Image (cartoon, rainbow, N blue to C red):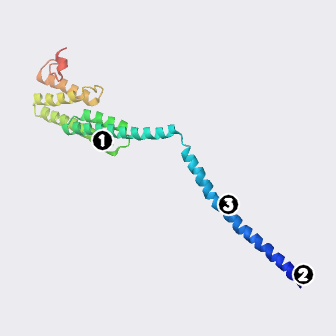
Amino acid sequence: RKESSAASDVYKRQIFIIAVVILFGSESPKEKEPQDKKRLLSANVNEVDSSFQKAIAKRRKDSKANKEKLALYFKRGLREFREGNYFRAINEFENAQQWSPNDPLANFYLRKTREKLEEQIESYFSKALRDTDAINYLQASTSYCSIIRLLNRYKDDQRYKSALEGIKNLEIKLGLDEGEIKCIEKEENK
């Protein structure tokens, strides 16, 4: 019995030692692991290149400058829109889009300005046709000239060509020579 109790005691001690090793052995790496990770992370953060930090600072500065430019062009565009200078407003809103292509207000007002310009041109055409039907040719020529002045930079625009054709028809109806109705002052000097 003594031998079996001695063997049993040795066996119990071995199990106890194994349990202690497992218990304390598994705890040590787990405790060290987070510290090692913290050291690596702090080392990585400290190793960030100063040029990278400068690039981040520059991007923030550029972003601020972009917002300022956007606000400037947007404000100008709104002023031109309110004044009814639709081509200038379109130009300003397009400039705003260059600084911030996805800006919802700039996109909205650009679309709205183009719609207003279309409405204005259609209004002039309607008035010209009404005046022509009412045999009020001089008033009709004023409406056509308004279209020509609006679209003077866009001579390939079909509406510009239609307005010129309307003026030519009015000159025939009034018994005038071609080119007598002058819509733009520069044409008078030629």
Tag 1: amino acid? Arg
Q: Name the residue under label 3.
A: 29
Check disc 2 and report its element: helix, strand or loop.
helix
Q: Which of marks 1 and 3 is in front?
A: 3
Image: 142 above or below 116: above
Check disc 1 and report its element: helix, strand or loop.
helix
Q: Mark 2 points at which residue?
A: 3
Quadrant assignment, res 8: bottom right
Tell me what residue is drawn at x 71 percent, y 64 percent.
25
Give the mark nearer the N terminus: 1 vs 3.
3
Give the alpha-carbon distance from disc 2 to disc 1, as whole Å: 100 Å
Q: Mark 1 points at which residue?
A: 111
Note whether residue 178 is visible.
no
Tag 2: amino acid? Glu
User: In the picture, which quadrant includes the N terminus?
Assistant: bottom right
Give the mark nearer the N terminus: 2 vs 3.
2
Image: 118 above or below 9: above
Residue found farthest to the top: 190
Could you tell me how many numbered marks the image carries? 3
Local packing at callout 3 (Cα closer than 10 Å; few below 14, some 14-19, many 20+) is: few
Check disc 3 and report its element: helix, strand or loop.
helix
Quadrant assignment, res 111: top left
User: In the picture, which quadrant includes the C terminus?
Assistant: top left
**Whole-percent x and y of residue 74?**
29, 39
**Whole-percent x and y of residue 15?**
78, 73
Q: Nearer the viewer, mark 2 or mark 3?
A: 2
